[in-house]
Amino acid sequence: MCKVELWFGKIERDVIARGVFTSIHDLKRKLMRYIRQYNQAPKSVKWKYFDPSRRITSKASVTVH
């Protein structure tokens, strides 16, 4: 599971699943408050590659559907 999936899962559990929202604006405000609080104590991500052939490089082609 990648870090992005973990992050969105955390937002789902901590904000969305437990929340009561009166509007889209209310949801946005609560999400932004959560993100600001979360960013008060940022943690760096240390990437590890166990298979060098799977690394993303500047020469890698990206397919967009």
Image (cartoon, helix red, strand yellow):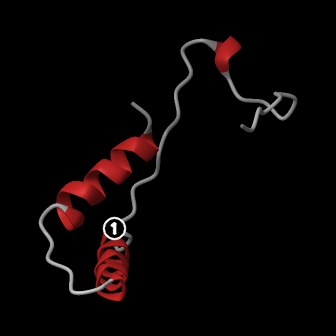
For image coordinates 29% across by 49% down, the residue present is 9
Q: In the rendered image of this protein, does residue 43 appear above or below residue 46?
A: below
Determine which quarter of the picture holds residue 18. bottom left
Q: Estimate the x, y position of residue 4 in percent, counting from the top left.
A: 45, 46
For image coordinates 16% across by 61% down, the residue present is 17
Q: Estimate the x, y position of residue 64 in percent, counting from the top left.
A: 75, 38
Give the class, few, some or many, for how many residues have Cα within 10 Å of label 1's Cα (few <14, many ≥20): few
Q: Residue furthest right?
A: 59
Q: Estimate the x, y position of residue 40 in percent, counting from the top left.
A: 35, 74
For image coordinates 36% across by 87% down, the residue present is 25
Q: Quadrant of the C terminus?
A: top right
Determine which quarter of the picture holds residue 57. top right
From the viewer's side, name the closer residue of 10 and 52.
10
For image coordinates 39% across by 30% down, the residue present is 1
**Number of numbered discs visible in the structure rendering:** 1
Q: Left of 44 or right of it: where is 28?
A: left
Q: In the rendered image of this protein, does residue 42 appear above or below residue 31?
A: above
Q: In the rendered image of this protein, does residue 36 appear above or below residue 52?
A: below
Q: Estimate the x, y position of residue 60 in percent, counting from the top left.
A: 82, 27
Identified by mark 1, the residue type is Ala
Q: Which residue carries the number 1 mark? A: 41
Secondary structure, mark 1, is: loop
Q: Left of 62 or right of it: where is 32?
A: left
